[in-house]
Image (spheres, grey):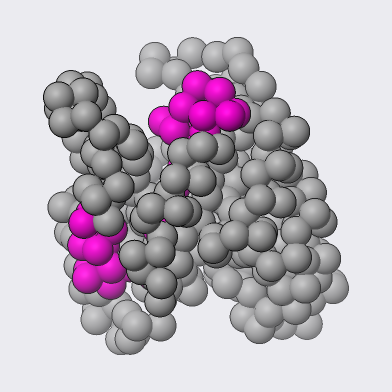
Amino acid sequence: MLRFSVWPSPQRDWSETSSLARWVDDGPWHGMWCADHFMPNSENHTTKAGDVAECWSTIAAIAAITNRIRVGSLVSPTTFRHPAVLANTAATIDRQSNGRLVLGVGAGWQVNEHDAYGVDLMDPAARVDRFEEAIVIINDLLANERTSFDGRHFVMRDAPCEPKPVQTPLPVLVGTGGRRMTEITARHAHEWNTWGTPETAAGRIRALREACERVGRDPGTIRCSVQALFFFVDDDNVARKVAEKAPIDRSIVGNAEVMIQSIARYRDLGFDEIIVPDFVLGDSAEVRRESYERFARDVIPAFC
């Protein structure tokens, strides 16, 4: 069955995020995701002002006020987050939530926050090298009594990670679209996430399956999720104008029927979960909630 999850911006006030979490927990939704950043992004890589809630504090708080939905990071960069800290944080929240945590990780990408805080983003090749070491360490820490690792970027000496998570294994998700990161996903991850319209996502999920073939893994053992910018627009003329300005590779514009048709294509491609960000759902908490309510009322039932 196709599942649906929400993704509120980290710039939302906690009153809105917590209200959404409680509402989602009582509805047809599967989960709630949190981005892991420390400031808003800027196109010219300069420091940008704006509230950004810390990811793992928010996840823990959401887990504490809900009972059913999955919670997770989309995604935590291994530039800022040491793998031992990530593993222990994830295991702790998994226990607090009775096995509802997904640990989403990535190599890092947002230039302005790395520059502002003096964290080396590194060149792409070294960044991916570091990420691969990190995900190997995370999986080992979560599964084994002690972890030893001697790498270029990380060194572990008989390192513990206690308590262990409820889930065995605790699902580790990788968010990526690049070739090498996709192959790392095929080797080490339990779930995979990408952005894009059905046309864009088709090539990426095909690349994941090809990576699985190269490493000898059954692609059916990796859960696949996808998100896009969902613009609810009922008027065809307005929809055309919105589509002209929206990012062409990650935007779906139209009424509920358009949404259903597009999501059916994701399903046919083999995606398990549709994530709905609130980034373009409205300029106020009330409008964003109304958009989510419309999604739950007019779109999700078509896939139940």
Q: Is residue 232 above or below residue 297?
A: above
> Can residue 148 be seen by looking at this rendering?
no
Q: How many marks?
A: 0
Of residues 62 and 179, which is closer to you in this image? 62
Q: Quadrant of residue 213?
A: bottom left
In percent of width and height, residue 180 lies at 31, 59
Q: Is residue 149 above or below residue 246?
A: below
Q: Quadrant of residue 156?
A: bottom right
**Left or right relative to 223: residue 171:** right
In percent of width and height, residue 24 lies at 62, 54
**Residue 206 magenta:** no
Question: Which stretch did the figure color magenta?
Answer: 261-288
Of residues 220 and 81, which is closer to you in this image? 220
**Residue 280 magenta:** yes
In percent of width and height, residue 247 lies at 25, 31
Residue at (41% x, 72% y) in the render: 304
Residue at (33% x, 35% y) in the render: 231
**Left or right relative to 138: residue 99:** right
In percent of width and height, residue 209 lies at 25, 74
Residue at (40% x, 76% y) in the render: 1
> Can residue 223 be seen by looking at this rendering?
yes
**Left or right relative to 60: residue 20:** left
Residue at (37% x, 55% y) in the render: 299
Q: Is residue 278 above or below residue 157?
A: above
**Left or right relative to 115: residue 216:** left
